Image (cartoon, coloured by chain):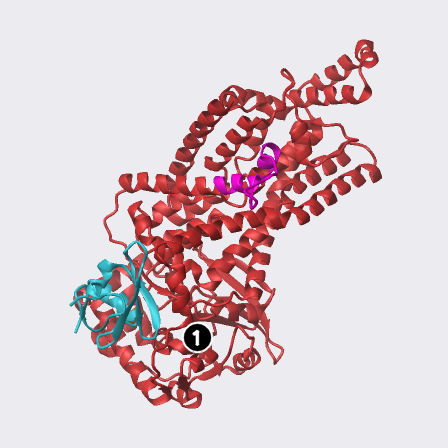
Chain colours: A cyan, B red
Amino acid sequence: MKLSQLKVGNKGIVKEFTDLEMSVKLMEMGCLPGEEVRVERIAPLGDPIAINVAGYQLSLRKREASTIILL
Amino acid sequence: MKADIRVALVGNPNTGKSTLFNALTGLNQKIGNFPGVTVDKKTGYCDLPDGRRAEIVDLPGTYSLYPKSKDESIVFSVLADQQIDQQPDLVVVILDASNLKRNLLLYTQVADLKIPIIVALNMMDLATRNGITIDIDAFAKKLGVHVVPISARKLEGIDKLKAAISYANKLALQEDTIDVHAIAPQLIAQIGEEMAVENPYYALQLAHQHEHLTFLSPGESNRIEELEQVHGFHSQKAQATETIARYNFINDLLYDTVQKKETAQEETWSNRIDKVLTHRVFGFVIFFGILLFMFQSIFAWSAYPMDLISTGFVWLQETLHKILPAGPLTNLLADGVVAGLSGVLVFIPQIAILFAFISILEDTGYMARVTFMMDKLMRKVGLSGKSVVPLIGGFACAVPSIMSTRTIESWKDRIITIMVTPLVTCSARLPIYTLLIALVVPNRNIWWIFNLQGLALTGMYLLSLVSAIVVAFVMKLIIKGREKGYFIMELPVYRMPRWNNVFMDMYTRAKTFVLEAGKVIIAVSVILWVLASYGPGKRFERIDQKYSQPQYVKTMKPDSLNRVIATEKLENSYAGILGHVIEPAIRPLGFDWKIGIALITSFAAREVFVGTMATIYSVSGDADNIESVKVKMGNAKNQETGQPVFTLAVAASLMMFYAFAMQCASTMAIVYRETKSWRWPVAQFLYMGVLAYVVSFITYQLLK
């Protein structure tokens, strides 16, 4: 399952990434394998989304979220 | 000022770095550029308890030493550049205690560069509220560095931090965090040997970043590239390996030193506010409401101080005429310099209010939400959500806004943002709009709350946003770009604005505006006064002779005679001749030769317009009757028709011209420096000039 498929309020645990370049950026921001992520809200126009990870809120576009595979 | 020790502040965005910087340096700070690049360099001075003086350098906030944007690339360069004399003796890493895990990543990277470090642990109160307890002694011991808990907002722990800075060891004491060698053993060894680099992490960073480091010679950079090929080094894979290793270290560290109470996740304040502020309907309504409130306030709150300042200048001008002996020098001072200055300085209150609003919006964390809400919309027209900040910043000034595009990762998004930012109504246009609106729009309320003049101003601001968006859309289709942009951004928790910071921001930026604009305005006013007061050949003498004929002296009152003489002299002065030369070109826009003079003088900087008007009408008006520029311009009559010069059509057309024309030398200079090519500023100048002429022409022809 991809992170982009979660609905608001749903949780998941990061398993792996499909894009190496994006994975470096996401990991630096705390999205690591094994980390729990939760979708907090979706922007008014449907994109980007805001997730809760490692105790703070991170916003990313759906395309970027689709590179995160959840357990 | 000489400093005994140089201290760099490093930390993630939103950790309170700027607040700490302000707390350490107070009003003792300046904004400059890093050598060779245009990124803002904020430095300030701080007296240490042992009597020494520290130079504090505030570096851009970053999440890691691997830069994602131009802005972040400066951090490693400053920490690593051993050639130019700006390497810090000490780094203060500021960590947000409520978000230690992510914050520590940057710490471990800086620590491995082996520059002496002190940790400032900020926002302890927030961490405690979230149920986090940190064993500070154990934490400090594990890292091997001095850890000072502070609360930058409440100014707690600042003295202890200063003391720690003065005791700081010249040698790095921190423990190693990860085994850097393991990431690329042979490559690190060989770079270390050939470049005489002892620190393995420094060598690894050279491998990653050599293409962007200005302190490496092309030869050195090529050699590193060769070595990478030989050893099969893959930068992104190595970064991934390193990041995972670092987080392993961090998890171990936090496991031993930090306790987190597992409380039921109650909804945070920030979340509840977000539900309203990023709501799909209310979110946009509130955003536009805030913008409208902002522009109304600029008008409403500034009226009294503006009156005070303009009265002061009128008084000063009068007094100068009274106490100084009559003559060209007095005229130059009173009608050239003072009149020119008053035209602009009177707008300080409005500019300060504008800067205060923008500072508050950024400080509270609301600007990040605007970015979040607008990203999709912005992407449709070829911009990024991150372009919203430069665009709104453009309301203050395009120059820092264009610098702030350095946070935009994609080249195409960034270029388009740079190209359209000068369209946004900047503070230099504000005086022009205010003046012209006050001349032709009645000061009346409709529907109780809306002031007509405020609405007209809001209209000009909205027009600028719309035009920026339309132009961006066109450019999206024209400019080619391959790389995909991305948008990974922290949404900081909402906070009360730090009024100290807001005030400091308002003060330093208004000061910069006054000093920078002031210099140009004095110079232009002097030149202009000379051009307006002297003419070629014997033209002035002939005018004097003509009007000393009895038929004029006897039939006209001295007052009107003086005015006629002055007007005819201005018309025959160098400035007048220049204005007449361009008159045929600007006639279709509704402008006469006097406005033409102002157009010419304000080509380098818009804010000169009002000063020019002040000078021209001071020269042409009669000297005993000193009034504010607005009254003078309101009284101005067309000589042939006897109608007022500034009709609605002329004022509207003039505002359109100033809305679109690229009359700002500083912006062109900054665009050149940011894009490293004349192509972009020239293209910008041309497209904006054409737009200005066409829109002015249409406006005047429709309204006349």
Magenta residue span: B434-460
Q: Residue at x 73, y 19 (%)?
A: B564
Q: Is the residue B431 above or below the residue B654 in the image?
A: below
Give percent across and percent down for residue B65. Answer: 34, 68
Question: Within 10 Å of the Cα at label 1, are there few (<14), some (14-19), or many (20+) other Cα atoms?
Answer: many
A60 lies left or right of B442: left
Q: Residue at x 54, y 46 (%)?
A: B427
Give percent across and percent down for residue B697. Answer: 46, 25
Q: Residue at x 76, y 12 (%)?
A: B546
B352 lies left or right of B66: right
Furthest residue in direction top, as rendered: B551
- Front position in the image: A26 or B246: A26
Q: Is the residue B561 above or below the residue B692 in the image?
A: above
Q: Chain of mark 1?
A: B
- Front position in the image: B355 or A10: A10
Residue wearing tag 1: B93
B283 lies left or right of B645: left
Q: Is residue B507 visible?
A: yes
Queried whether the magenta region covers residue B412, the answer comes back as no
Q: Is the residue B561 above or below the residue B309 in the image?
A: above
Dot 1 falls on a residue whose secondary structure is: strand
**Quarter of the figure with the N terminus of chain B:** bottom right
Type of amino acid at the residue the image marks with label 1: Val
Give percent across and percent down for residue B311. Answer: 73, 43
Residue B519, quarter of picture: top right
Q: Is the residue B101 above or below the residue B58 in the image?
A: below
- Front position in the image: B148 or B145: B148
